[in-house]
Image: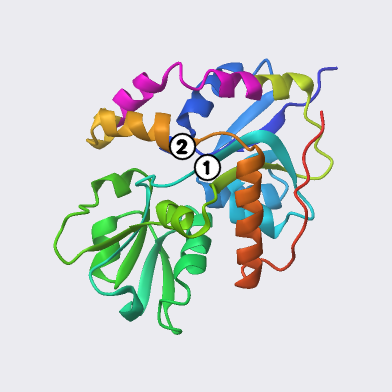
Amino acid sequence: MPEKPLKFGFHNFLNAQPILVPLCRLAREAGLDMVFDVPAVLAEKLAAGELDLAMVPTIEYLRRAQEYLLLPGLSIASRGRVDTVLLVSRKPFAEAANVAVDERSRTSVALLEILFGETFPATVRFSPLPPDPEKMLAGHDAALIIGDQAFRVPRDEPGLNVVDLSEEWFRRTGKTFVHAVVAARPGVKPTRQMLAALAEAKAHRKDGVEEIASLRAEQTGVDAGTILDYLENRIIYDLGEEEQAGLRHFQQLAHQRGLIDTLAPLRFIQA
């Protein structure tokens, strides 16, 4: 009898599209049943046993690093400015009593706490909200805006403080920041066909990137050139030595801030 397909959770944010598009074409032959949702929900489904493996926020992997295994060679990372993870405020950050944060992802919130936890007032409140920059800022002193919506933030608006968290992380640490990784539950045994499909999807990630940029530009109104530059030059899809070093550094700082309970070595899936 054929093996039961592995349930593979993947988010469909813009930064995942170059991998996701070719992977979907290869999924059936690779024995994958693709499940789509936002990163935070994928992490919950993986923890509940509803998925075999998933692209999850890095902080969610680190919270279960003693349990989960990492898929080698693949992540969503950055090394400097990305324009899609922005802290925005109309008052000094030290005076921000409440901060709206995008409810769809959790790694960016953890990064925010690590970078600005000592800048915000001790009593600062973080409120998870849907991704609507105007509404987020209307009722809060500052907002963490991620994804396509962040492209529309006017960096040159008088009185508006804007910090790119990926750029700030690199400025302070000199290390790559890993936003998301593929984690698997214990006992999940990926086939060689699955690993080959993922390797092929990664190898061909640039083939359709112009079409992806054009389509997303039509959907969002963001300039296609801006999106293309983001996908080709701002996002890293590797999980090599530099990415692993950045991931471990983030793990250490998250532990120091009390965002994760334990420090555990990175463990990888074996075919």
Residue 256 placement (x, y as % from top left) = 64, 71
What residue would you read off at disc 1? Answer: 77
- Tell me if 25 is positioned left or right of 84 in this view: right
Residue 107 placement (x, y as % from top left) = 53, 56
Q: Nearer the viewer, residue 44 or 215?
A: 215
Which residue is depicted at the point 60% across and 46% down?
56
Region rendered in magenta = 198-216
Q: Is residue 81 above or below residue 270?
A: below
Main SS class of the magenta portion in the image: helix
Q: Is residue 44 above or below residue 220?
A: below
Q: Nearer the viewer, residue 123 or 104?
A: 123
- Tell me if 227 is positioned left or right of 242 in this view: left
| Numbered mark located on residue 133 in the image | none
Q: Nearer the viewer, residue 70 or 135?
A: 70
Residue 126 placement (x, y as % from top left) = 43, 71
Can I make out residue 245 in this image? Answer: yes
Can I make out residue 37 in this image? Answer: no
Q: Mark 1 and mark 2: span between their CA atoms?
A: 6 Å
Q: Residues within 10 Å of mark 2 (few under 14, many from 20)?
A: many
Which residue is depicted at the point 54% across and 40% down?
76
- Inspect the image, locate mark 2, and give the three-letter code of the amino acid beneath it: Ile
For the C terminus, the quadrant is top right
- Tell me if 96 is positioned left or right of 39 in this view: left
What residue would you read off at disc 2? Answer: 235
Q: Residues within 10 Å of mark 1 (few under 14, many from 20)?
A: many
